[in-house]
Amino acid sequence: MTKAVESALPACPQCGSSYAYADGALLVCPECGHEWAAGDATASSDAGDMPVVRDAVGNVLADGDNVTVVKDLKVKGASNTLKVGTRIKGIRLIDGADGHNIDCKIDGFGAMRLKSEFVKKA
């Protein structure tokens, strides 16, 4: 009897097929035709460790999303407030122990951390 050898390659992130194969530096799914870098497959499996971050209305946020502020926020150390409707481009999600789970750069304020409950996906 011969044993079936299990593939060490990850499943397709788009359709979940277990028949992915390596084609040079890329992994390819023969069922849906999706191609992705081998490093992306390990990053997506590590993403399961990070909790899902949702905005004020329940949309799931991801790195690189653009958001808008839904409430006037007083900023410590600044003389003015962050107004409703302020657009923030290219957020980064972090695992902040104090509840601040968005790292971003805001024009006129600089780099800061925000709580996801005060923004919505743009």
Image (cartoon, helix red, strand yellow):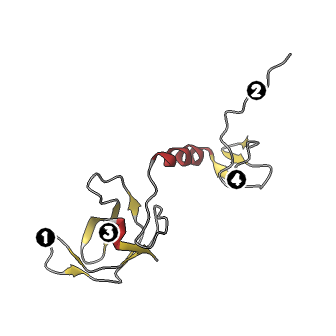
Instruction: Examine the rendered structure and indicate whether residue 51 appears above or below residue 116.
Output: above
Q: Nearer the viewer, mark 3 or mark 2?
A: 2
Spatial separation of the CA atoms under disc 1 and disc 4: 47 Å
The residue under label 1 is which amino acid type?
Gly
The label shown at residue 105 is 3
State left or right for residue 87 relative to residue 3.
left
Bin the neighbour count of mark 3 within 10 Å (Cα to Cα): few under 14, some 14-19, many 20 and up: some
Name the N-terminal-most of marks 4 and 2: 2
Spatial separation of the CA atoms under disc 3 and disc 2: 48 Å
- Identify the residue position indicated by label 2 in the image: 5
- Identify the residue position indicated by label 1 in the image: 77
Spatial separation of the CA atoms under disc 3 and disc 4: 32 Å
State left or right for residue 69 relative to residue 23.
left
Instruction: Examine the rendered structure and indicate whether residue 46 appears above or below residue 6.
Output: below
Task: Residue at 44%, 49% (x, y): give it.
Answer: 50
The residue under label 2 is which amino acid type?
Val
- Identify the residue position indicated by label 4 in the image: 35
Q: Quadrant of residue 106?
A: bottom left
